[in-house]
Image (spheres, rainbow, N blue to C red):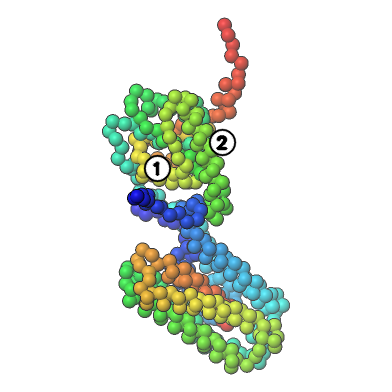
Amino acid sequence: MEAHAAPAEHHHGPPAAHVSSRIDARVLGMLLFIGSEIMLFGSFFTAYFFVRVVNHYPWPPHGQQLPVFVAGINTAILVTSSFTMHWAQTSIKKGNRAGLQAGLALTFFMGLTFLLTQIAEYARIGFSPSDNAFTTIFFSLTGLHGMHVFVGLTLLLFATIRSFRGHFSPEHHHGVEIPGIYWHFVDVMWIVVYTTVYIL
Amino acid sequence: MAERRTWNPLRSEQEAFELVVGAIAYFGAIALAAGLGGLWAGLAVFLVLTVAGIAWFVNRNRRPEPKAPMGSRATPEDEHRVLVVANETVAGRALHDAVRRSTVGRPSHVLVVSPALNSPLRHFVSDEDGARAAAQARLGRSLHALADAGIDAHGEVGDADPLQAIEDALRTFGADEIIISTHPLGRSNWLEKGIVSGAQQRFTVPITHVVVDLDAERSTADAPTTTA
């Protein structure tokens, strides 16, 4: 006896949900995440402005120095990494895999340099978080940002490895786009932190 | 001409990068002014740049560039195709009369599109199930009302934006004429948003605007009839 099997169309799970035609769910997730991040940073900046502006706390207190020059060099490195990130993104859009790989690798190593330099500065800065309100807020703000750089570096590491394994194409590069948005956000937050804490 | 989207630095890497460049210019200028001219110079630059930035953002997003006028896909020569876009007004007599005038005496095909109207918040978070279910229910009643009026039509639920719903329909259905039905001026949200004039600019297909006053039709229907 011959068995006839109809070509089976396997269906797994429930039907696809209706979604907005304008906002990609992954981009929406990133948007909500960064919204919560802005609120987190906002609470730290509120403490900073409260101590410095409302209470007229001397900034930095007498006898304590901020490493403005080294942090400036570090800022330049981080800002440059945004440009290499953008280069990586535009490269994959044009199908230039070498540009993608070089851009991601450069971005990763510049981010790593920023983080290691910041850790080295912490070791030799000469004050600790528990000394006074200034040092507490300084370490809180820059440390919070440092943790975000670490998360960004993790995302970049995955994207870089994937790029060397042949992933991503001009049509499909969400795995580069999302870490790129995050990295630029981390960069903008550092520009705000550096300007307000170190410069002004 | 491509439509200009609302600038959103969280939507794409390109826009996030533009935010980085903007932040460098913004904070760089403030720091430079404060360093060279002191606190008040820094504050002045901060205020000027902040106001200018807000004005640029609002102005850019208020006046999006219009899309290039769009036609319909090809339609059969021996058939008159009518695309009806309506929501609550689809049961109106004025609309039925307009559709009948358009289709009488020739082979016709009528497609009713019911936009899945949604609140901005629900739309933003992709919560469209309720809106689509409501639109589907409205569409069912509409097709039933049209059938009662002797008009053979089929329908589909469209995008929440009526113009986008028309564009979507024209890509698959193709139409020789578009009929947009709205409430009267003053009660119509679509007229307030310029949907009809927007459609006339955006599509090359002839557009008929039908105003349906459901209250007036209802009161006429309820009025006692006098017999001779």
User: Which amino acid does the dot numbered 1 rest on?
Assistant: Ala
Which corner quadrant of the image does residue A96 belong to? Answer: bottom left
Q: Element at badge 2? A: loop
> Could you confirm whether marks 1 and 2 are on the same chain?
yes
Q: Horizontal and vertical percent for residue B113? A: 45, 39
- Give me the residue at 55% from left, 90% from top: A120
Q: Horizontal and vertical percent for residue B18? A: 45, 68
- Give me the residue at 58% from left, 25% from top: B218
Label 1 marks which chain's residue? B
Q: Element at badge 1? A: helix
The residue pinned by badge 1 equals B169
Q: Is there any visible trace of residue A165 in the rendered image?
A: yes
Gap between marks 1 and 2 measured at Cα: 26 Å
Count of marks placed on residues: 2
Checking the image for residue B87, the label placed there is: none
The residue pinned by badge 2 equals B187
Q: Is there any visible trace of residue B90 in the rendered image?
A: no
Whether residue B9 is situated above or below residue B123 in the rendered picture = below
Mark 1 neighbour class, 10 Å CA radius: few under 14, some 14 to 19, many 20 or more:
many
Whether residue A59 is situated above or below residue A19 in the rendered picture = below
Q: Horizontal and vertical percent for residue A128? A: 66, 89
